Amino acid sequence: MIGPEEFIDLAKALRAVPSITANTGSGSAALAGPYIDGMSLHNAYAPLYGYTPGPNPVVPRDDELYLAMMGATKSFERSLGVVRDELARNGRTVPIFITEYDGVFFPDKAIEDPVKTVARNSTLDCALYNASILQVMMRNDRACGAHHMSLAGSGRGSLVGVEGGVRFRNPHFYVHQEYAKEADHIVVKTALDPETAVFNSIAVRETPAQTAVPMLDVVATRDPAGKQFALFIVNRHLFISVDTTLTTNLPAGATGTRIKLTGPNHDSRNDAENPNRVVPQTTPWSGDASFSAQLPPHSLTIYRWTLP
């Protein structure tokens, strides 16, 4: 990594040469803004290490670790917004790319058995972290691309899990399958009033504590023709169901489906023995413009409507 002054000098020299890029720290946007053609951020993975900061680290309870991970989606959205606004202030409405994202726990054998640490990466909760991160990026009009940490394997939250010679779909697969359907759709305005449905999280090594994180995370889309609509809702809390009222301005006559991705527990995972422990469940749906919903803990709920 180079500092902003060196970046500016280098950028001036490189502009005459096609297909060359230079990297600077994200904190350099203010000074180097006029010279930046795009920015890559490397802050969408959490909690990274699953133990407390300081000279005498301890491993918190699993539920505290997962809540710290889910709370980190709030700080990612805040930092992504700061970078977008700072670039705009400098007249550089350039694309922002996310180097990699995932809910991930790196092993440290001096702190915890690595087998236990790595096993967290393929859980439903880590998949839901991905869902919330995708929604954060969808809401930010400068986020133009992102790379998920792993597509296949056994060590991280890969889309396809591998055990011996057996391959199966992790919960992450279903999350990305559903959001991929929105690739050419338009993000539309939503308003969320969390009222008292919020939670706090503790600090773990690389992840600061968070307060008043809304349990629900929401994004809505429509296709360019205005015929297909979708509402994605992540309940980020591990144990608390949220009863809510949803109000839309959809025209009359819309019908569709409701998809729920959840599992027996927040740390449920698929494996070679039971590859379908966590799979989406789809049911017909034809709710009114305003309706009540109960959103279970550790879940992703998707409403899709189609106009005749």
Image (cartoon, helix red, strand yellow):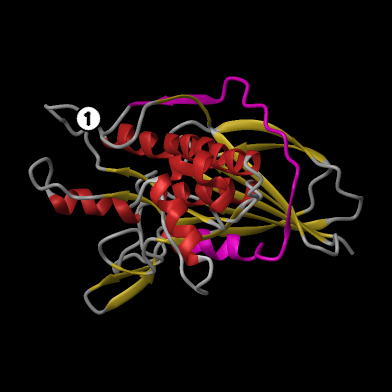
Seen in the image, is 184 located left or right of residue 14? Answer: right
Over which residues does the magenta segment extend? 174-202
Q: Nearer the viewer, residue 285 or 71?
A: 71
Seen in the image, is 109 located left or right of residue 39? Answer: left
Whether the magenta-drawn stretch holds residue 184 is answered as: yes
Task: Give the residue at mark 1.
Answer: 53
Residue at the (50%, 35%) spot, across then down: 74
Which residue is most to the left?
110
**Up/down of 166 relative to 137, above or below:** below
Residue at the (53%, 59%) spot, across then down: 280
Residue at the (53%, 42%) spot, across then down: 80
- The x and y percentages for residue 85 are 61, 39
Whether the magenta-drawn stretch holds residue 215 is answered as: no
- Residue 7 visible? The answer is yes
**Up/down of 95 relative to 290, above or below:** below
Which residue is most to the top?
196
Q: Nearer the viewer, residue 25 or 276?
A: 25
Classify the position of the C terminus by image quarter: bottom right
